Amino acid sequence: MFEYVEKIENADLKNYCTFKIGARGTILFPKNLADLKKVIKDCENSHLPYFILGNGSNLLFPDHDLKSVLISLKKFDKIKILRSTSTGAKVYVEAGTNLFSLHNFCALNSLTGLEWSYGVPASFGGLIYMNGGAYGSEIANFVLRVKVLSGGKVRWLRRKDINFQHRKSNIDGIILGAEIKLANGEKNEILNLQKEYFENRKHSQPLDKPSAGSVFKRGKLLPAKIIDEFSLKGSKIGGAEISQKHAGFIVNIGSAKSADVRALISFIKQKTGINFEEEIIILE
Ligand SMILES: Cc1cc2nc3c(=O)[nH]c(=O)nc-3n(C[C@H](O)[C@H](O)[C@H](O)COP(=O)(O)OP(=O)(O)OC[C@H]3O[C@@H](n4cnc5c(N)ncnc54)[C@H](O)[C@@H]3O)c2cc1C
């Protein structure tokens, strides 16, 4: 099956997520829209579940082999300036674009706005789907419209028709790319800002250890603050630890299992008595 598309069967999923946790699975890499449509159709015809893989920076894979086929849009990685004006530009970014590449593109073209996201290890599609944000900004503020594949058809969703909420969106379908608006800036200022945001991250987040970022969503309650107040930093189950540096992160301190992370999540909820909502996506 899927002979027409690049694929890795029996892939070690640890290498496809920032948590470095998981067993084995099949990953497909369609190279264009026709391939992608065919892959989806074949999955549907054979009742094979599929899951869109971005950069795997918000995912917890299971300890058993994945039943769903993973579809990576890594080959959808073009960025194009559609229109430049005296104040800024409209840019189309394909979903598989790595966020670091987008930042390089922005600096090269003196386009400012996204510096707050420098260091988020996401694909652009994943950032849109999750409505990624940091330091008081979120990607929804830059989106003009999103191109999706849904029900076998390509459609454009206008910004006003998308419900972006904290770390989620209601986008139904596979995000192929999005048009965003950026402002004109000055290259060195952009590079300096990117560096500054990255330094802030390095200072506050355990970037030296595998994780999937913040485990829980922030709402009225600030999970990291509460977990810290309950003195849970450093608590361990198996190879998973509540980061000593940032209580909102669970880190993999060596050969952590999905079960260890899940148990630590339950431990946090039980100790604090709060049923925090997970931000990370836990695959079964
Ligand atoms: C060290 C670290 C720091 C982080 N800091 C932040 C932060 O500051 N702010 C923040 O918001 N997040 C942060 N995160 C979490 C994570 O980077 C974001 O949630 C990111 O947006 C996920 O993007 P991804 O491409 O890795 O998606 P994945 O983790 O691969 O997937 C996440 C979800 O998006 C869906 N998806 C991905 N691509 C598509 C597509 N093309 N079409 C439809 N659905 C798609 C997947 O199916 C899945 O449901 C951090 C993570 C780490 C490890």
Image (spheres, helix red, strand yellow):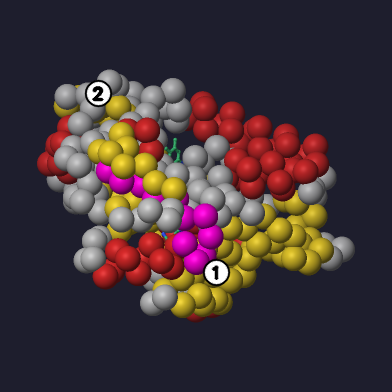
Instruction: Tell me if residue 58 can be seen.
Output: no
Q: Residue at x 37, y 33 (%)?
A: 15
Which mark is on residue 27? Answer: none
In the structure shown, which secondary structural element does the residue marked by tag 1 occupy? strand
Tell which circle, 1 or 2, labels the residue nearer the N-terminal end: 1
Q: How many marks?
A: 2
Q: Is residue 128 above or below residue 201?
A: below
252 sits left or right of 189 in the view: left
User: Residue 265 sits in which quadrant?
Assistant: top left
Which residue occupies the extreme right position in the image?
Answer: 86
Q: Residue at x 31, y 46 (%)?
A: 26
Which class describes the residues within 10 Å of circle 1: few (<14), some (14-19), or many (20+)?
many
Which class describes the residues within 10 Å of circle 2: few (<14), some (14-19), or many (20+)?
some
Q: Is residue 55 magenta?
A: no
Q: Residue at x 63, y 43 (%)?
A: 101
Does label 2 point to a residue whose CB lies under 8 Å from ligand 1? no
149 sits left or right of 90 in the view: left
What amino acid is at disc 1?
Answer: Val
The one of 37 and 5 positioned closer to us in this rendering: 5
Q: Is residue 77 above or below residue 175?
A: above
Instruction: Tell me if residue 23 can be seen.
Output: yes
Q: At which x and y percent is residue 37?
A: 43, 68
76 sits left or right of 256 in the view: right
Q: At which x and y percent is residue 177?
A: 56, 62
What amino acid is at disc 2?
Answer: Ser
Query: Which residue, given by chain and number where applicable, does mark 1 sit on?
Result: 146
The one of 38 and 254 positioned closer to us in this rendering: 38
Which region of the structure is painted magenta?
A: 25-35
Query: Which residue, given by chain and number where applicable, does mark 2 sit on?
Result: 255
